[in-house]
Image: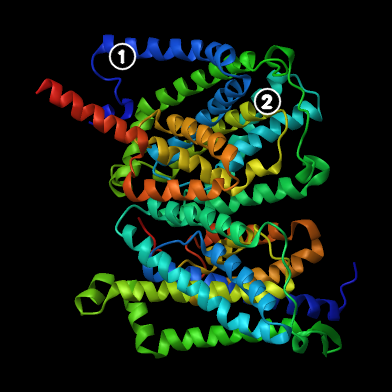
Amino acid sequence: MADRMETGPVTHGNAGKWIWISVSGLSLIILPFVLEKGISQYYLFLAANILAWALFALSFNLVLGYGGMMSFGHAAFFGVGAYTCALLLVKASCPLILAFLAAPFAAACVGLVIGYLSVRIKGVFYFAVITLCFAQLVYILVFKWRSFTFGDDGIQGIPVPAFISTDESYIHYYFFALIIVLICAFVLWRIVRSPFGMILRSLKENPERAAFVGVNVEHYRLIAFVISAFFSGIAGVLYALLQTSISPDILFWTVSGDVILMGLLGGMTLFLGPALGAAIMVLLNSFVTSYTEYWGLCLGITLILIVLFFPRGIGGIMVERYQTWKKRKEG
Amino acid sequence: MSLDPSMLLVQFISGLTTAMVLFLLASGLTLVFGVMNVINFAHGAFYMLGAYLAFTMTQLLSGSLGFWAALLIAPTVVCVVGGIVEVGLLRRIYGKEHLLQILLTYALIFIFNDLIKMIWGVNLRMVNMPASLRGFVTFLGSRFPVYYFFILGVGTAVAVLLWLLLKKTQFGKLLRASAEHRDMVGLLGYNVSTVFTLVFMMATWLGGLAGAVIAPTVRISMGMGMEIIIECFIVVIIGGLGNVLGALLGALLAGEIYAFGILLLPNFAMAFLFALAAVVIIFRPYGLLGKPAQGMS
């Protein structure tokens, strides 16, 4: 049952699975051309933006959806990834490949420190508050350490190599991001389905029992936390390369809140739920902010409605509908 | 840098004033957690609302009267808003996952921020200090703003009243009992829902009071609630979530560390606070006065 939940609709037979995969793969490849020719560059930019956030949301869900750890500090890893890459490119004129590789490791190191302090604590509230506080420390350091991070000026004009340049079209960048996100998503999916992933889920369901059968709870939680920080760092790099300018705002704690919302919107019990949530958030944001300056009000009300009436998220509702439909068809 | 004794005294007193404001906020945060087992992420928003209401009161009524009226009315309005929020929203999710409770109060931050933006706009606002609290006093050879002592007085008064309320009154007994054995209190015929509403209103009243008290010393802006909530969280981590005495201890430590940290590293004084919080977590994961049994999920 649990497994069926994880993969959502993609579970009825092998043939059906491959049809699903090829259809979605094909549409991901065709989509940018349709957007570019049919609508506008702006939507292609949004699509690329969604890719970066989707990766962030997927890596975050390893901690919250699978590990049951309510981290309110993931902006730190996203931001450290983005800043590491950007600073290496701007200050050290590093080749992109090195800057790209260094970023997730830097994020994982920060994740190790914050995670080490946080996984010792049981209880959702304590965990949320502690991760929040330490992530905010990273924000303050980046904000105040002008000589190193440019402070609140941020980093403008991050040099992006020609092959993913977004000056004329976002299409090259889209495919670059798509390949990276797909690879990362595949690795995350393997992690979730591995014995490690099973243990992680058992820690969420019943940490006492897991500890009783000899699982080192803190150890596994920390590993999950660091892996999640690592991939969040990659998402940060994608974001920085897309925007070509970053500011300490991406480390502020509302960004940690945003990624939680993506998970909640899309559904945390599904592997791809958070990615769906990321798409909804990005599109909703661009739609709402084009009409009104009160994006926060809209976001807050949406969030309250979801919390009160649809706690399983939109992805969760879709899967529920699909399953009852299938049952009716069969029976 | 010269560290003469008078300088240290100045920093010490200034640290105490910071501590008192933090205590006003953290005590509400910790009370709500202790009794209701809810972390109110929107606590900073109530503080901000208190400050903006104080601004409006001083605009409506001229002279010192505006400030004193603000001190009375701003917390009261904030506490009514708090009551509405508790009855209208929080009450619906007590039995549900903690995650949903956190997200609900988190959503309130955005709603409050935008409503305040609608009502008061995005410009920075200032509140004039009443004439009687302006100026300086000389104390042990150093000059201090009179307002420092006003904040100290308010903080001390609240701490004493809160202690009396919790330890000496029937209501306080009920609160402490609700924190320990919620179901039992219900079985004894008390209305736990009403207790929760009253606690939440009390906490938001304290938050609004903190906002009104701090208003004349800061520029009132949209972000003020978001910033102070982090410091409050650190205070309750240090003191122990759910423990009012812990909040006082945490606030005093935080205020003083901040005041002296600023002498050493002016830009990174906050970092000392985080360092202390990290040390506390490593050696006493549930805070200096906290109990591990609380907040377990």
User: Residue B186 falls in which quadrant of the image?
Assistant: bottom left
Say whether mark 2 and mark 1 are on the same chain: yes
Disc 2 residue type? Leu
The subunit carrying tag 1 is: A
Say which quadrant the N terminus of chain A sits in: top left
Q: Is residue A141 visible?
A: yes
Left or right, residue A274 beside residue A3: right
- Asked whether A61 or A152 is in front, the reply is A152
Disc 1 residue type? Lys
Name the residue: 41% across, 39% down.
A265
Report how far apart the C-alphas of labels 1 and 2 lie in the structure.
33 Å
User: Residue B67 falls in which quadrant of the image?
Assistant: bottom right
Element marked by disc 1: helix
Q: Is residue B140 above or below residue A21?
A: below
The image position of residue A246, as x and y in percent, is: 71, 35
Question: Dot 1: few (<14), some (14–19), or many (≥20) neighbours within 10 Å?
Answer: some
Name the residue: 71% across, 49% down.
A141
Left or right, residue A166 beside residue A40: right
Q: Which mark is residue A241?
A: 2
Q: Is residue B246 visible?
A: no
Element marked by disc 2: helix
Q: Which mark is residue A17?
A: 1
The image position of residue A109, as x and y in percent, is: 61, 38
The image position of residue A150, as x and y in percent, is: 80, 41
Tell me which numbered mark, 1 or 2, is placed earlier along the sequence.
1
The subunit carrying tag 2 is: A
Q: Is residue A90 above or below residue A292?
A: above
